[in-house]
Amino acid sequence: MAEVAGVTVDTGHWIGGERVGSAAEFTDVSPIDEQPIAEIARGGAAEVEAAVTAATRAFPAWARTSREERARLLHAIADGVDKRVEELAQVETADNGALIRSHRRGVIPRVAHNFRFFADWLLRLGHDDFETRGHRNHVSWDPAGVCALITPWNAPLMLATWKVAPALAAGDTVVLKPAEWSPLTASLLAGIAAEAGLPDGVLNVVQGLGTEAGAALVAHPDVRRISFTGSVPTARNIAAAAAPNLTPLSLELGGKSPLLVFADADLDLAVDLAVEQYDNAGQVCLAATRLLVEASIAGEFTEHFLARTERLVQGDPRDLSTDIGPQIHRKHFERVDGLVRRAKADGARALIGGGPNTDLGGLYYRPTLFTGAPEGSEILSEEVFGPVLTLQTFDTEEQAVAMANGTRFGLAATLATGDPERAARVTEQLVAGTVWVNCFFVRDLRAPFGGSRQSGVGREGGDWSFDFYCDVKNTVVAPWEK
Ligand code: NAD
């Protein structure tokens, strides 16, 4: 047990409806001040085996549970989340350093919404039958089995429930392995689900390191689906581990997304969109970190952008006036700093920031904007996952599209323009799972979500989630003789 932000959190695993410890533990450190906040059970192959066994045992009964009952339980979990928004927000902020105001206002309420949305979607899931020469083709979405869900630290509970909710709705059972830098809210979720009446073994949580618990889980032959959100190098390891079993994978990975600002854009809106990319201290997969601005307005845009960023307040994420909190972990902070140093060595110039916030110390990194990065340099092609943006200019629409598409990623793209025809033309040519026109981050859970190129494999959301988490079956029935 640990006491975090006044909330008691169990630090063990949740397997088959029981709290289970491990002989080994790892230390969970708060990014706010780098102080230890909990000693967490460090699971490995044995705990994974126990969890997959519990999930396998629970599967037949859960798969047979009516859609209505599954939906009712998912709504009951959402009710439990709604009752604990403040607790969950406090623990998440202590654990991953994201702003308390964002957790309270958007992120934790979205957790409840994930459960409600997939519960309701389940009830309307279906397809009209197809007729072929009097034969009826009936499509059904059958539960697939045990799902391994592996999640990152930047929005821990929100991203975990984006997978847990559809998997449970689909009639699958789950083993969730949360990120080791932010393990706490997964433990609270297990408690909420149990209190809501979810049967034992339907949701299991194994804590531990990716290379230990995570690796054992994705290699397990009884796992029927792997859904992973995280980095490209880890995705490669997971895909390799899944290959011998041919376990179907959904991979939601990183990006180096562009924000295209055309001269015909509303300048204030474009600047707002650009500044928004520092949200969550830049630790957002979808962040449009490459600002591509039409040369004729680049000077004015930059002036307004710098004026706006100067007003951003960096500090303790529990403080309501804070706009930018810390980086998640010392290792991550050093990775960000390494990329910034090498960008400078490559000839890029920091118009703002360009280093740690020495006034605050700890893991606080100054919002940074680079210009003049040489074409092909690391800072223009590698995901930083910190508060670091680059600015480049273009002269023509064709050039803008080529620059936007010029990385190995394709997660998202944002454009600011006042011309609907241009928006349609450019959108059509962009390689991205999500394109935003004159907006950012708005997303309907009915729509598909995922990345192109190395930003991911597959799509989740609405029907796409059920297509992934289910064995979709076509049953062809010959006409019955009269
Ligand atoms: P990461 O890849 O280091 O870790 C993610 C998870 O994988 C963790 O739970 C970790 O323990 C686990 N893991 C590590 N090695 C493993 C292995 N060999 N087998 C199984 N599991 C293993 O990623 P991160 O640093 O936690 O998250 C940041 C990355 O996630 C960024 O690249 C970001 O863009 C990406 N991300 C993508 C999305 C999206 O929806 N596309 C959303 C959020 C974050």
Image: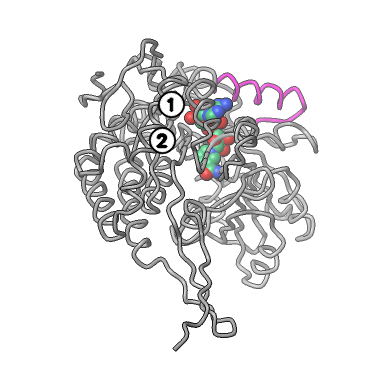
Q: Which quadrant would residue 238 be assigned to in this image?
A: top right
Q: Is residue 349 magenta?
A: yes
The numbered dot on residue 213 is none
463 versus 230 height, above or below: below
Left or right: residue 122 versus residue 430 is left
In percent of width and height, residue 288 lies at 59, 46
In percent of width and height, residue 97 lies at 39, 28
Looking at this view, name the residue that lies furthest to the top.
23
Q: Which quadrant would residue 33 be assigned to in this image?
A: top left
Asked which secondary structure carries label 1, the reply is: helix
- From the image, tell me which residue sits under label 2: 175
Looking at this view, name the residue that lies furthest to the front.
481
User: Which segment is the magenta one?
Assistant: 332-350
> How far is mark 2 from mark 1, CA to CA?
8 Å
The amino acid pointed to by label 1 is Val
Looking at this view, name the residue that lies furthest to the bottom.
482
* Residue at 62% over, 50% down: 259
Tag 2–tag 1 contact (CB < 8 Å): yes
Which secondary structure type mostly characterizes the magenta part of the structure? Answer: helix
**Is there any visible trace of residue 284 in the rendered image?**
no
- From the image, tell me which residue sits under label 1: 48
**Badge 2 density bin: few <14, some 14–19, many ≥20, Cα 10 Å:** many
Q: Which quadrant would residue 11 be assigned to in this image?
A: top left
In percent of width and height, residue 433 lies at 60, 54
